[in-house]
Image (cartoon, rainbow, N blue to C red):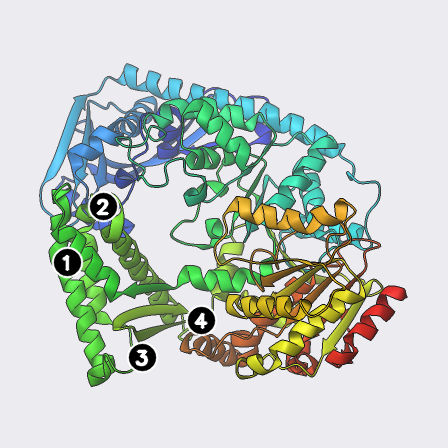
Amino acid sequence: MNATTRPANSLAGLLNRAIGVRDLATFVHRCGDIHHRYEKATLAEEGIARQKEWQKHRGDGYRREFLVSGEWHGIEVAGRVDGWDAAAGVVEEIKTTRVDARALHEHQGHLNLAQLKLYGGMLALAGETPKLLRLIYLHPDEPGELVLEEPADADELTAFVERTCAAYADWLAQVAMRVARRDRSLKALRFPYSEFRSHQHGLARRIYRAWRDEEHLLVDAPTGSGKTMAAAFPAFKALGEGKVDRLVVLTSRTTGQGAFERAFGDLADAGARVSTVTVTAKARICFNPELPCDPDLCQFARGYFDRMPAARDDLLARGVVDRAAVEEVARAHRVCPFELSVDAAAWSDAIVGDCNYVFDPVVRLARLQTPTFPRAALLVDEAHRLGERVRDMLGATLSRRAVKDALKECSGSHEHVGAAGALPGLRSVDRALASLARQVFGAAQGRVEGEREIEPPAALLRAIDRLLHDGSPGVELTHGGAAQDAWFDLARLRLASEWAARAREAGDENDFAWVARWQGRNLEVELVCAAPGTHIRTRLGDFHGSVRMSGSFRPQATYQEVQGFGADAPAVAVPGRADGLGLFAVVDISTYYRDRDRTLPRLARLIRDVTLAHPGGYLVAFPSFSYAEQAHAAFAACLSQIDEMDPATRCQQRTMDLEERAAFIDWLGRIKAAGDDRVRVAFVVMGGLFAESVDYPPEALDGVIVVGPGLAPKSLGRDLVARAAAARGFDGHAVGYRQEAMTRVVQAAGRVVRGPGDRGLVLLVDPRFTQSGFAEFFPGHWQPQRIRARDAITHARSFWAS
């Protein structure tokens, strides 16, 4: 049935004004606290099954999932009433939950009642006569229910619908006016810099077409080619011309987020009137990281929804919003900074955040795509890491030691008595793990460490199911600690097992594999995602076109396969600059693990010779912290033998906070900026904070020395990745081992020669860099000259003299 009243606002064409009943009730009527324990829902199939059981004895006139819709104040509202008995005039809303029903109602009963009133009002406006509103709470596994009723007055209910839609329409009118202003500014927007870099204009045009035509484009553009602005500028033009509704930018590091924040800032300075929001990881931005999201313990969770609307409006009015701005506004309004950033991002023009907000099924943010802005354009920066990241997101690991720690904590819990409810389930899981260890490793337990592929552990999964169904509320009551950590591991493993089962049913039997690992007298069970391509392609398909961008996409066919696309999928390669780059492969220093002690003195002399040839700033990138630390010590010993150099050296630490990271980057540029021409040598780890996705100050670096290809040690997990790739007709070892290693090599080398007119040296140290299996991952403009270590100083001097 349908009912229509007043015409839409004159700006309605700018926005999608359709909304579901639940979303409408939430936007207009939500108030009170954040309390994530009460946000957890049962599985959809569980709720449906329990609801059907509750409704099965109703009479013939009882209607289930009854569709109602209508338009008021230009807002198109639709939803399905759980139960409608026209003869009795009873409207029912049914909620299925495992948490205490009365506690849940105390927390969010006002929302459930608002939803129920909207259904009642919509029925009244369609000519029906609701007489009673009935709100029902059911447990999915237990009999009994909590039933709350209140009489219905048709006039009051229709007025409630009118007021609710009017409030939402007023908000949309404000948003529409902002979007209109934005579009006018973006149509007039010009490129913010005096000129395009080489190939940058053509790349921008190609990216614009990808979003306009809803393509999924792979962009191979070398570091320093201006790809950040080549993506941001056409994205804003597409916004202004109505080709897309918003831009979602995904990065894998905070340094990548900063690059887009600066690009958005430059575009804003050039006249773009946009609202952009960076969403920072909850663990990093939380004001009370030691506390759970509990209003009894955290003032920023208490009353959050009462204060959030004003804070959201304040934030959106600031234009380009970074982490600092989010924290400032959140403190001023006393609200949770993470939740504020997400609530503001839902109404922004562009969102910057981590890849997991799209690709991780557990933490995915649905608010990146909303009914108001349905055509979201997706940009994945540094997308060479996408396959690796998504493998981690779809995999899961459970340790028996973690389960034992949880058992110990729950057994001794006095403050939270409810935790004791988890003990039987935890004991059952522990017994299943012990049994699995005996089956897989037998008498070798305690003597031999190793890992083996196993069949899906059915008994363990059944035990986990029982715990999650019967004991999870008690575990959550522990407010963090070992029990909650174990519960998250258990829940993720169970979810991952469902993803693996679906993949196997679809015929992708090599996409996931189970591994049992015995190490340090502890059993670990891991579900390995070996082939994430299907998931990546599916998630990208949810967007109005996507662009995956990196300077390390060679060979393209391999990356397309890992990310779920064929070799003929849309792709573009931007030529790199070879004129300012001195590229050498040092073929007589082996960096195999077995050779490192022997070749370390020669490596130290090589670093000394190259830096002596042209004092300046240098990165030396290693495959591990231990190798970097050993080389740093050897370099210092080598320098003590001569008087010609007074170097400044630093070695990346295994743990560094944000301030220490910023100081490290600043140190490399500060000496040259002050006119000091001393040698500065930074010993860093490939794939880490300082060798990838970081922009150093202009002219900070004169050279990069990459020590070895950094192949990961042979492991069952990587063998499974290789097997999955081989099953699709690709070089398994290339995908399982060489691809990730060589990506890190290319990224480290890309820290130098980043802009027009830049010059710099890159030395690749290891004879394997001359082999075709490694060289196939080189950028197209790389043609390294083979040299011996003793000749490096001559070649370096010749390069700088040219």
Whichever of labels 2 and 4 marks the residue nearer the N terminus, that label is 2
Separation of disc 4 and disc 3 at Cα?
23 Å
Quadrant hosting residue 765: bottom right
| Residue 270: image location, x then y, percent | 75, 32
> In the rendered view of the protein, which quadrant contains the C terminus?
bottom right
Separation of disc 2 and disc 1 at Cα?
14 Å
Judged from the image, the secondary structure of the residue bearing numbered disc 1 is helix
> Disc 4 vs disc 3: which is toward the camera?
3
Nearer to me, 27 or 689: 689
> In the rendered view of the protein, which quadrant contains the N terminus?
top left
Whichever of labels 2 and 1 marks the residue nearer the N terminus, that label is 1
> Disc 1 vs disc 3: which is toward the camera?
3
Q: Is residue 216 above or below residue 430?
A: above
Separation of disc 2 and disc 4 at Cα?
31 Å
Mark 4: which amino acid? Ala
Residue carrying label 2: 476
Mark 1: which amino acid? Gly
Residue 425, numbered label: 1
Quadrant hosting residue 673: top right
Say how many tags the image has.
Answer: 4
Judged from the image, the secondary structure of the residue bearing numbered disc 3 is loop
